[in-house]
Amino acid sequence: MLTGKKSRYFPVYAVALLAALFASPGQAATVYFNDFQGSTVGSEWSNTSLASAPNPDYAGNRRFLGEFGNGVVSLTLNNLPQHTQLSLSFQLYLIRSWDGNDTTVVNGDPLGPDTWSLGVAGGPSLLSATFSNGNPAGQTYGGAFSSYTSTAYTPCTAYQGYSGPGQYGPMTGANECYSLGYYFNDPNLGNQAMDSVYNLNFSFAHSGSSVTLNFAANGLQGLADESWGLDNVQLDMTPVPLPGAFGLLFAGLCALFGFARRRYAR
């Protein structure tokens, strides 16, 4: 317990400390996460299909949301706390023979373009790009090359010196190549490992109490040829600062400064 003349300043300390604490900007808070390791998926997803990657040697059993083909898969979250921004992170699995920019017609069916996109319902488009798992026509998605490889197959840096017709070489920006264990039996090249993993992150201004995220693909052949999935989906929010936060902070700092001046003036 404080006694004597110092006790007179305890309320000043308390007010200043509380003001500083409550005035601090809100830290990002996770409002949703799913690694799809459970047996079921909630109704927040428009499609609740689950699959397991066939490669058991990489990080155990990789269970994910998918496999999907053409069309939209939506995540809808309601009753969000007050916030000013949302940040989304997830892993995108691209499975088998994604052909990127290739528009060659085979048996009356164009190989591509194979496009994957992400958008916010009533809000911004966050991504729309073509992807290739090896087709030399390349892709429009770009990113930093990764040297990662979990097998003896060609690592993600294989197309770093790409000079083909596409904007970027196949698997540009992929964080993993050939790690999931999927194969595609190409009629000309034989049975080949074909899959890639992209770690994607997006932030966007948002303040509504609900949000719908639309993950989609188009231009794909059937699931046995080209498909995709999602894993480790996480949504974080930046909370709204408490009312009058900056005023409280200023008042708290002034109180501390005034106390310090009086203390050292004695």
Image: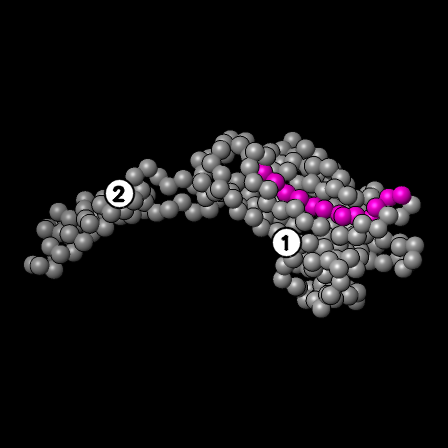
Q: Position of residue 181 (x, y in %)?
A: 79, 55
Q: Is residue 191 above or below residue 73?
A: below
Instruction: Pick whichever of labels 2 and 1 is earlier in the sequence.
Output: 1
- Circle 1 sits on which residue? 199
Q: Position of residue 178 (x, y in %)?
A: 76, 59
Q: Residues within 10 Å of mark 2 (few under 14, many from 20)?
A: few
SS state under label 1: strand
Q: Is residue 81 above or below residue 139?
A: above
Residue range in magenta is 108-120
Q: Position of residue 168 (x, y in %)?
A: 69, 59
Which residue lies at the image location 56% right of the left edge and 40% below the top edge?
124
Which residue lies at the image location 62% right of the left edge and 46% below the top edge?
127
Amino acid bearing label 2 = Gly
SS state under label 2: helix
Left/right placement of residue 224 relative to residue 48 reads: right
Which residue lies at the image location 65% right of the left edge and 57% below the top edge?
142
Rendered image quadrant of residue 123: top right
- Is residue 147 something one can see in this rendering? yes
In this rendered view, identify the residue nearer to me: 40 or 92. 92
Which residue lies at the image location 69% right of the left edge and 40% below the top edge?
216
- Is residue 68 something one can see in this rendering? no
Give the alpha-carbon distance from disc 2 to disc 1, as whole Å: 40 Å
Main secondary structure of the magenta stretch: strand
- Circle 2 sits on which residue? 247
Left/right placement of residue 173 relative to residue 85 reads: right
